[in-house]
Amino acid sequence: MAISDETESPTTTTNVKDPRRAAVQARWSVTAVFFLNGMIISAWIARVPSIQADLHCSDGELGLILSSFGVAAIIAMQFVGALVGRLGSALVIRSTLLIAPLLLACVGLSHNAAALAVSLLLLGASHGTIDVAMSAHAVAVERTLKRPVMNGCHAAWGISAVLSSLIGAGSTRAGVSPGTQFAVMGAVLLLAAVPATARLLPSATDRSTTPQTPKPERTKTSWRAGWRGPVLVFGALGGILMVCEGAVNNWSGIFLHHERGSTLAAASLGYTAYVACQSAGRLVGDRLNRRYPAVLLFRTSAAIGVLGLMVAILVPFKIAAIIGFGILGIGTALPLPMLFSAAGHAGGDGPGAAAFVSRFTTFTYGGVLLGPSLVGWCAELIGLGWTLTVLIPLMAVVAFKARIVAVADEGRAGAA
């Protein structure tokens, strides 16, 4: 959105008198939204084993139930662009963030498989909605401030995911049921949602009816809009990154144990190194993005990811594999948030950003949902080591297509 440099009258509100200060406050507000969303989603993920034991579900039944979350999230994402166009991302975020903690409590209080499936279906839909809306709002903040904030938002999500997982582990060890834990967390998160969203940018910022957006230039925001060339490229690159991340999350421990002879205790260190380095990279990502051109930073990061994969997979020592996964974490820290930002800026000012982000997020979710399974199926045919080796040229493709993120720099610089 454009920021006027004209002096406002004394009767105007604080936010109007100092729009940059309002945008800075919105930056921390949307970062808090990312944090709360990470807390909600990671809470139930950490307690899946406990929920399975309580409901006596088989692995097949549980897999079918859990798939309802991802399917609902992907379907909901297709409509967020139109929803933001009608209501604005701020109102969508506030409404959904007040519903999600209640749905989390419903997940924990489900007494049978059918109730759990319905609760996860609704939680998945709310997550898909807020995931797109908060990314679109972060893009709006970037346009207003003319500087990147997306890496910090994703860092907040990662930190909250770790914190929520630790709470889940502690609750499990203390014998606290998922229902009790989720009810308490839901209440706390519900109370936190009100102040967390209080400083978001006004809903008119990215609503299609905003007077600053001329009618002929409005981006279409129907559920069918946004499926065109640039989005497909963004989505393909995001999908590759999420396949790599899913491979590390689900298969790095097995690779270390079976292929490198690590103990079961040491096998988890690959994932730990990956997450720790990725989170550290995202904490400084926005600062680096302000200092260096987006294309250079993106290509360098992806090249570091290629190096990490090569070290982890091709060097036949377990310590090298752990170090390699850590280097991969550094390499993947920035590209995904940068693609989120670039996809939003490519959608233009207003609700078009949400439309493009929703399409992009569909691909990343596809990578998360299908990636681990694809790795498993290929490992059955050619072995896990060779399967992970295939990820090296895929990551090289990401580095090769770095120029596509230049639109983020152009979008931030073009906001007047």
Image (spheres, rainbow, N blue to C red):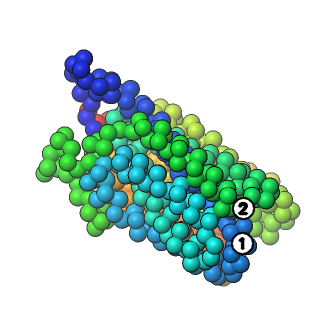
User: Could you tell me if the residues under marks 2 and 1 are in contact, i.e. CB atoms within 8 Å?
Assistant: yes
In the rendered view, tell whether residue 196 sits above or below residue 401: above
Query: How far is the residue under mark 2 from the one under mark 1?
Result: 9 Å
Q: Nearer the viewer, residue 295 or 162?
A: 162
Residue 223 % position (x, y) = 30, 65
Up the image or down, 236 lies above or below 208; here it is below
- What secondary structure is found at the residue carrying circle 2? loop
Q: Earlier in the sequence, mark 2 or mark 1?
A: 1
Residue pictured at 53% horizontal, 68% vertical: 119
Q: Is residue 371 found left or right of 144 in the rendered image?
A: right
Q: Identity of the amino acid at label 2?
A: Ser
- Res. 245 in view: no
Residue 54: assigned label: 1
Which type of secondary structure does the marked residue at label 1 adopt?
helix
- Crowding at mark 2 (Cα within 10 Å: few <14, some 14-19, many 20+): some
Q: What amino acid is labelled 1 in the image?
A: Asp
Residue 236: which quarter of the image?
bottom left
Q: Which residue is mark 2?
A: 177
Q: Residue at x 42, y 30 (%)?
A: 24
- Point out residue 415 in the picture as x, y percentages from the top left corner: 28, 36
Quarter of the image for the C terminus: give it. top left
Q: Position of residue 413 (x, y in %)?
A: 32, 35
Q: Which mark identifies residue 282?
A: none
Q: On the rendered structure, is 173 left or right of 156?
A: right
Tell me which corner region of the image, top left, top right, bottom left or bottom right, holds residue 67. bottom right
How far across and how far down the image is residue 132, in percent?
41, 55
The residue located at (27%, 53%) in the rendering is: 85
Q: Quadrant of the N terminus?
A: top left
State whether residue 195 appears in this view: yes
- Residue located 30% across and 61% down the image: 226
Q: Residues within 10 Å of mark 1 (few under 14, many from 20)?
A: some
- Above or below for 121 versus 178: below
